[in-house]
Amino acid sequence: MRAAGTVPGRARSHPNVVLGMLLLVYVFNFVDRQILAILAAPIQQDLKLSDGEMGLLGGLAFALLYSTLAVPLAALADRTSRSWVITVSLLLWSGFTALCGIAQGFWHIFLARLGVGIGEAGGVAPSYALIGDYFPSERRATALSVYSLGIPLGSAIGVLAGGYIAATVDWRLAFFVVGLGGLIIAPFFKLLVKDREASPLATGHALGRDLPSFGATAALLARKPSFWLLSFGAACSSMLGYGIAFWLPSLLQRSFGFDLVQASQFFGALLLIGGVAGVLGGGWLADRLGHRDRAFYSWLPGVAFFIGAPLFALGISSSNAGLAFAFFLIPQALAYVWLGPVLSAIQHLVEPSARSTASALFLLINNLIGLGGGIYALGAVSEFLAPYYGEEALRYSMLYSLLLYAVAALLMGLAGRSLRQDWVDE
């Protein structure tokens, strides 16, 4: 019996092939995003930028259009082709990443980062929806965690490769290399990844007919307390997570005396070891605990944030690089635990046909606050504290920001009860 919405004879991709290609694209997504962090010091020196300006480049310049355009692009993906939207987005953000390499001043690189954000806006939410299409509910958190490995893997590759290229050649070449790589894999992605179900256009329906409208999906989510609690809980954690991820290489150079390559190796190892363990562990635990009680999809991240905050404080406060690595490793893993459980829970707040739109609305809140605010806030607070703490101002800015994890843990804890009621089985 043919599944509803599919077309007879329509080519399908194997779920693991889809997941692998989506992971590869997501790796490039985060290489492009994270490379700016390890290149911050040489960019600041070359273009004469302050911490506040660098915070704008890492946060608001990227997040402004990345967060807002994700919503209409996700709605377009739900109604046309998720794989095509991802492919075009990959081409756009890779091209603009390469353009960062020719920037001659703040506004040049600011506009190029805006372009990267425009491209990446169409990549993540449709990817979540494709995973939801290809993997059943009981395996979805694990599949989303495998996809989310793109965050630590892409971040680590960006940090390690960017640091090496910048130290041995020039920071501009790093942008060129990364941008070219994305342009090369885009056609292979479209060839291998097919939409699981036919779009309304492919089946002859009018655009958007028989699908929930954007307004209907937004109104449905607005009535569900778990959506708001999960979104703002994730946003608070992302403010700290993105802030530390962006500024930690600079802290290592300022407070520990590392050079660029040493900072990239330290941070890259943290991302690979801690990040991979946290992402996979969170998804695995959520799928095994969540079938007993849906509340575990939010409680598990809440516990991770609660435990992670004091451990981050020990790492930030340490004056010994070896001890700092040991203290950072566990909270770095805990910082990624939320991805599989929360992303899976968001997928289950709506019907399958609205998954891209629901994911984009979640990402709008998470990224506009977390990515747009966190990096800039830590940089701005560092500037404010500079007269009092000098070169150690960035360290204290991070310490004060750990309060965000306490708020995130509280919101995730409160989301558990309402999540049981708001869950949509399919």
Image (cartoon, rainbow, N blue to C red):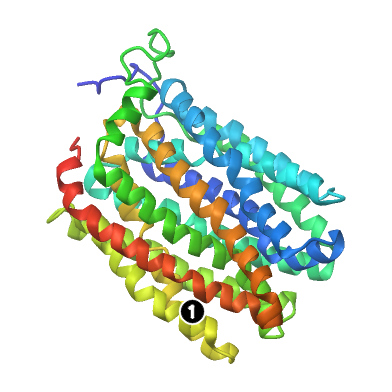
What residue type is disc 1 on? Answer: Phe
Q: Is residue 56 above or below residue 215?
A: below
Quarter in which the C terminus is drawn:
top left
Tell me how many marks there are.
1
Quarter in which the N terminus is drawn:
top left
Q: Is residue 11 visible?
A: yes
**Residue sitting farthest toward the left:** 292
Q: Is residue 192 left or right of residue 142?
A: right
Q: Dividing the picture into quarters, in which one does residue 264 lie? A: bottom right
Q: Dividing the picture into quarters, in which one does residue 322 lie? A: bottom right
Which percent across, then down, holds residue 155? 58, 61
Which percent across, then down, holds residue 276? 44, 66
Q: Residues within 10 Å of mark 1 (few under 14, many from 20)?
A: many
Which percent across, then down, holds residue 268? 59, 71
The residue positioned 34% from the left and 75% from the top of the image is: 307
The residue positioned 48% from the left and 79% from the top of the image is: 328
Q: Nearer the viewer, residue 15 or 312?
A: 312
Q: Is residue 232 left or right of residue 100?
A: left
Q: Is residue 298 left or right of residue 104?
A: left
Which percent across, then down, holds residue 291? 15, 53
The residue positioned 81% from the left and 56% from the top of the image is: 173
The residue positioned 59% from the left and 65% from the top of the image is: 378
Q: Dividing the picture into quarters, in which one does residue 165 lie? A: bottom right
Q: Which residue is mark 1?
A: 328
- Secondary structure beneath dot 1 equals helix
Q: Nearer the viewer, residue 109 or 378?
A: 378
Q: Is residue 264 visible?
A: no
Q: Nearer the viewer, residue 224 or 37?
A: 224
